[in-house]
């Protein structure tokens, strides 16, 4: 299936059954290149399940998922590996390799993609600087705070410069201040042109950013705001949204500090 | 996989062997001890085989000549013996020499021979046989044929001893094969499980590697290399321990043989391949890779 070049993630009439109690039902959603979308729904709504279908760890019973040239109805093992290299994935529990250093964790994605050593060194250094963890490159994950671990996970996810970053409750294990910094980082990555699809149960956290939000409940999309094509609108969105995000983050900050007192 | 990645997978295997030193040491010791049982078994087999070979090597057939057969007849018989398939060496034993040997064999009791007026022993040929021909049926046939020759009184080759020895050797080989198979299967089982534990302990890492787009080959090869290294080191350990056991046992049983250099190399190589294959199998089953 061919889809609009401007769409990076397309989900079409996706259904998946898990026994009597749960399933995903006729889900349709598209994420445009460079877009930032929150996937919001209560716990058990099916967000993680849907994301797993998108990065093709599982497959729908009906309908299909399209990411770039990859179509879920005709995937092979090699195609999945390739898809993962072009898709960043971040989880609530970080999923770092405990027996590898920060540097090695980030390098893993590049090594898997077959990059040369020189290129890996350059790229990892640059990314670790970007997430502010270059000075901890020789540390092991257990030596880092939760927020730092998530930064490493994000660094790894964007190491191959993916067109889209999928994040499943990336702030779920983090306190308010760290949550704020992780969101900032995700916005920054998005501003660099990477589409971001972030799942969260916390509507309060995300509703103030003026971002597109897709609501999921009981395995159905119950509400979706309009897709924002970034292409020609890039400038305007950068000005308005990035500005607004900054304001919101500041507001939250002030509120957060007040609450702490 | 490109050239860089081939480097990475070996590097990865080396790093993991280094970082999981304790776990690897435990695996190697477990494998090494179970392989030790196998090596000791092989040594027992080897030494038993040597004993059997030596027994066969010492076995001779005696062809006794008729009294007064005469020298031309004796020479003729010698030529015919040498012409037989299965005969390796023929030595003429004149009656005088036989008597001397007999005396020596009797030792202290040799004075009973002094009562004899003349030498009662016949001239004889001592025939050394090729190992392949040391079988009851073959020797039976051979001895009957020789017995019909002119000038031959009779032949002897310890037929009862041979039959009993053959039964013993057959029984030994049967038991050896049976026990060997059981040990081999147990050792493979132990190694498979040990390697499987390594894979299970890193199942999460494997899942993460898949998540970031590592191909199956990229994930598998470090485990193959690790399995191979574990197998080879464990084999080396087993051979080393067996050498100690051998040295101790040799104090009581001098002449005890040990595996030769080639056999050791082959053993280590087989264990290395086994480690790799088993680790591949474990990943296949556990991870559907
Ligand atoms: N493989 C599976 N088999 C059976 N049920 C599953 C499976 N995966 C997920 N579920 C069920 O799907 C529901 C939604 O799960 P999930 O996608 O994790 O929701 P969310 O991420 O929105 O909290 C849960 O009730 C869970 O028990
Ligand atoms: Mg979830």
Image (cartoon, helix red, strand yellow):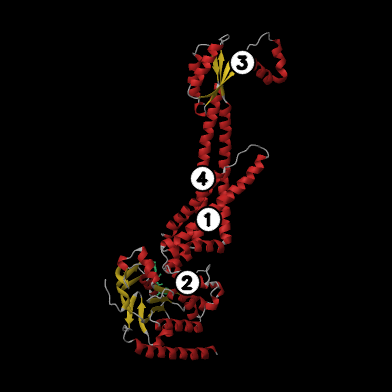
A18 sits to left or right of A153: left
Q: Are marks 3 and 1 on the same chain?
A: yes
Question: Do the residues at pointers 4 and 1 share their chain?
Answer: yes
Q: Secondary structure at mark 2?
A: helix
* Mark 4, secondary structure of its residue: helix
**x 50%, y 26%: residue:** B133
Q: Earlier in the sequence, mark 3 or mark 1?
A: 3
Q: Which residue is mark 1?
A: B229
Query: Which dot marks residue B184?
Result: 4
**Distance from the alpha carbon under mark 3 to that under mark 2:** 88 Å
In the shown orientation, is residue A13 left or right of residue B157? Answer: left
Q: Residue A213 in the image: x percent, y percent?
A: 36, 82
Q: Residues within 10 Å of mark 2 (few under 14, many from 20)?
A: few
Chain letter of disc 4 in the image: B
Number of residues whose C-alpha sits closer than 10 Å to that of mark 1, classed few (under 14), some (14–19) or many (20 or more): many
Q: Are marks 3 and 1 in contact (CB under 8 Å)?
A: no
What's the CA distance linking mark 1 and mark 2?
Answer: 29 Å
Marks 3 and 4, how far apart at CA: 53 Å
| Tag in front: 1 or 2 | 2
SS at mark 1 in the image: helix
Instruction: Please tell me which residue lies in front, B102 or A199.
Output: B102
Q: Nearer the viewer, mark 4 or mark 1?
A: 1
The C terminus of chain A is located in which quarter? bottom right
């Amino acid at each position: 299936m061919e889809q609009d070049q401007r769409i990076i993630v397309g989900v079409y009439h996706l259904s998946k059954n898990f026994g009597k109690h749960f399933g995903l039902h006729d889900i349709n959603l598209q994420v445009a290149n460079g877009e930032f979308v929150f996937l919001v729904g209560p716990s058990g709504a099916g967000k993680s399940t849907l994301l797993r279908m998108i990065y093709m760890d599982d497959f729908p019973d009906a309908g299909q998922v399209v990411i770039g040239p990859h179509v879920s109805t005709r995937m092979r093992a090699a195609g999945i590996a390739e898809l993962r290299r072009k898709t960043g994935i971040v989880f609530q529990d970080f999923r770092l390799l405990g027996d590898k250093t920060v540097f090695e964790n980030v390098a893993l994605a590049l090594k898997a993609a077959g990059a040369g050593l020189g290129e890996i060194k350059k790229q990892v250094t640059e990314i670790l600087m970007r997430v502010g963890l270059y000075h901890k490159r020789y540390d092991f994950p257990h030596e880092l705070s939760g927020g730092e671990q998530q930064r490493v996970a994000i660094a790894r996810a964007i190491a191959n410069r993916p067109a889209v970053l999928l994040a499943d409750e990336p702030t779920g294990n983090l306190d308010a201040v760290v949550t704020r910094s992780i969101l900032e980082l995700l916005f920054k990555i998005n501003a660099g042109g990477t589409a971001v699809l972030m799942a969260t149960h916390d509507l309060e956290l995300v509703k103030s950013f003026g971002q597109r939000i897709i609501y999921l409940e009981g395995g159905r999309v119950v509400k979706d705001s309009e897709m924002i094509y970034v292409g020609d609108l890039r400038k305007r969105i950068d000005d308005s949204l990035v500005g607004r995000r900054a304001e919101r983050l500041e507001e939250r900050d002030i509120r957060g500090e007040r609450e702490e007192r | 996989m490109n050239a860089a990645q081939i480097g990475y997978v070996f590097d990865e295997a080396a790093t993991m062997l280094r970082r999981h030193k304790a776990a690897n040491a435990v695996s190697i010791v477990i494998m090494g001890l179970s392989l030790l049982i196998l090596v000791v078994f092989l040594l027992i087999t080897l030494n038993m085989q040597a004993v059997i070979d030596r027994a066969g090597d010492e076995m001779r057939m005696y062809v006794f000549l008729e009294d007064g057969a005469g020298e031309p007849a004796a020479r003729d018989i010698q030529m015919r013996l040498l012409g037989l398939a299965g005969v390796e060496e023929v030595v003429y034993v004149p009656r005088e020499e036989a008597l001397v040997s007999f005396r020596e064999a009797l030792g202290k009791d040799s004075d009973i021979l002094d009562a004899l007026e003349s030498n009662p022993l016949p001239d004889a040929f001592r025939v050394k046989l090729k190992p392949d021909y040391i079988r009851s049926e073959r020797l039976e046939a051979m001895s009957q044929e020789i017995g019909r020759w002119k000038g031959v009184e009779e032949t002897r080759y310890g037929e009862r001893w041979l039959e009993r020895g053959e039964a013993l050797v057959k029984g030994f080989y049967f038991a050896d094969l049976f026990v060997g198979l059981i040990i081999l299967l147990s050792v493979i089982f132990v190694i498979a499980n040990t390697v499987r534990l390594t894979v299970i302990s890193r199942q999460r890492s494997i899942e993460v590697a898949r998540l970031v787009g590592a191909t199956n080959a990229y994930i598998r090869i470090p485990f193959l290399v690790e399995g191979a290294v574990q197998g080879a080191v464990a084999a080396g350990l087993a051979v080393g321990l067996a050498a100690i056991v051998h040295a101790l046992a040799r104090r009581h049983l001098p002449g005890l043989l040990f595996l030769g250099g080639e056999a050791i190399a082959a053993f280590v190589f087989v264990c290395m391949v086994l480690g790799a294959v088993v680790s591949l199998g474990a990943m296949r089953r556990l991870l559907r890779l």
